[in-house]
Each structure stands twice: as structure tokens, then as C-alpha cells.
Amino acid sequence: MTEPAPFSLIIPAHNEEAVIARCLTTVLNDAPTDYPFEVIVAANGCTDNTVEVASLVSPTIKVLDIAEGSKTNAINLGMSEARYFPRIVLDADVECTHSSLAALAEALQQPGAMTAAPAIRLNLDRCSWLIKSYYAAWIKQPYAKSGKGGAGCYGLSREALEIAGPFPKIIGDDIWIHTRFPDEQKRLVTEGLDGQPVFSVVRPPRTAWQQIKVEARRQLGNAEVRRDYPSPHFAALGQGGGWRKAIRSGASPIHLAAFYGMKVFARIEARLSQWRGQGSTWTRDLTSREL
């Protein structure tokens, strides 16, 4: 019988006391006691009880209390404390079971695999109808179905980390990783070796305004990486297909109107943020963190 692939899980967390326990218990609930893995919570710039809440979940979790509020710095410090390869980064407001994480680790053991991401399951409970319309179109877009972002979770092989090096001080950690490697070196893992589904549960913003702000941050993060860390792999990452492909995907005109309408408003908000000198400011949705 093949030995399970070990892995280190790094969870950057900034003021996540409302959701960090949910994230951690989801990981640990189905974790075998003899599986070689570790969980590192990289709490950064927290002014709430994130550190205390995470520490109470399990004595096996290593919690770092980092003064600087920076996601990429927190990831780097988590990496420096990690013992195993591959390494998986999971957002604190996202849920992913141990079995799904282990499937990512298995995929990253294969030759040529640099990154791996799970399928996305959206939890739209308590979301407005505009948000439900937006994500009805979003989930049908090629990038949402191909593992190129949006899952709040990605894994990196030892070789990938050696090639990419430390994360730069940017706001778009996932876009930076996904533009370091060509598509043939990325793995979208939808099923484990045991046939069980592999996915992360993502809770989008519940209001249109919060979605616009999050999308504006994403656009700014993409622009920052494109400007400061250019890569030939940007073109493949951004293949959305436009209106015609979106319509052929089965999205309704109403859903597409919500989707593209919020993207237009997000572009305006992104430009206003740049004008206000807030282009590199981290914007975080709080509505999805209300339990």
C-alpha cells in the first residue's frame, strides 16, 4: 500500500476570530491520527482573538503571532516554519476537509505538477439575489472551472517553491502563483484516489457592494502582479471568452447582466482607489464572516 503524501497546511489569518475555528475543525474532523501533516496558522496583524481561538481548537496546531499585517509575509513565515512538502495555502474563511487536502498533496507528488487546486463549491446562503445571479454566471466561466483561482486554496510542490521563491509583498498571492507556471503544470483535483469529491467551500460576499469592493481588489492585485512581476502565463489565466462564450455556457442574460455589471462598477471602484492612493490596500469582505 502506498504511503500517504505528507503535507504542511498554512492558513494566513488577519482578524479571523469569527471563522478560524470553523476552518480548522473542518480540516481536523476527518484527519486520521497517523497521517503525516501539520497545520500552521499564520496570524498576522491581529487585533482580535484569532490567536487565542486558533490555539484552543487543537494542541497540534502551530499558531504564529505575527505583528505585521501582511498576507504574503505571513505565508512566507509559515513556509519557513513548515516541515513537509508539498505545502498548501488555505484562506481562513474557506472550508476544506483533510481528505480534499490530502488529494491535493497526492497530485503534487506526480512528476511535473507544480500547483494544485480543488473544485469550488459555493455557499450562497443569506446572499442577495444579485450575488446569486453574479455567481450563477461566474461559476460557468472558464477560469472558475479550471482551477485558476477562486477556491481560496492552492498547493505547491517542493519544485514549485524552489522556482517561485518567497512571495513578494503584493495583495494578489493567488494570481502571482497561478502566473508563475504554464497550464500543463497545474492540476485541478476534483476527485481523490478513493473516488471521493475534492473541493473547498467558498462563501462569497452577501451584498453587491461588498462584491464590487472585493472584485476591485482582485483587479488591482492582478494589475500589480502584471506590472511588477510580468509573466508569459497571464494570457492563459485570463481566458474568459467574452460574452459569446459566456452565453454559450448556459448562463442566463439576467445572470450575465449582474456579472458584467458588477465587474464594470468594480473597475470604476479600482480606479477611484488608485486615485485616492489606496491601490495596494487590502480590502476584505466582512459580510461572509458573519456567522
Image: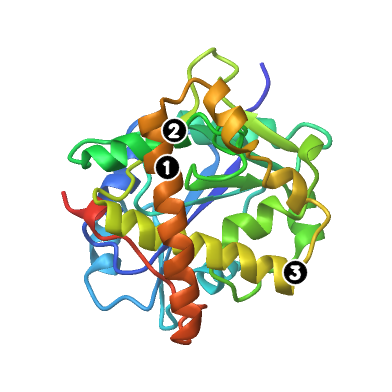
Q: Quadrant of the N terminus?
A: top right
Q: Which residue is mark 1?
A: 259
The one nearer the camera, 151 or 78, is 151
Q: Earlier in the sequence, mark 3 or mark 2?
A: 2
Residue placed at 83% from the left, 34% from the top? 111
Q: Which residue is mark 3?
A: 229
In the rendered image, residue 289, in percent from the top left (x then y), is placed at 24, 54
The one nearer the camera, 160 or 33, is 160
Q: Is residue 282 left or right of residue 116?
A: left
Identify which amino acid the numbered label 1 is placed on. Phe
Residue placed at 42% from the left, 78% from the top? 69
Q: Which residue is mark 2?
A: 137
Identify which amino acid the numbered label 3 is placed on. Tyr
Q: Closer to us: mark 1 or mark 3?
A: 1
Toward which corner of the image does residue 64 lie, by quadrant?
Answer: bottom left
Q: CA distance from mark 1 to mark 2?
A: 6 Å
The one nearer the camera, 90 or 137, is 137
SS type, badge 2: helix
- The correct choice, above or below, for 157 with respect to 55 in the image is above
Q: Is disc 3 in contact with disc 2, using a CB cutoff of under 8 Å?
A: no
Q: Residues within 10 Å of mark 3 (few under 14, many from 20)?
A: few
Q: Residues within 10 Å of mark 1 (few under 14, many from 20)?
A: many
In the rendered image, residue 79, in percent from the top left (x then y), is placed at 60, 63
Q: Is disc 1 in contact with disc 2, using a CB cutoff of under 8 Å?
A: yes
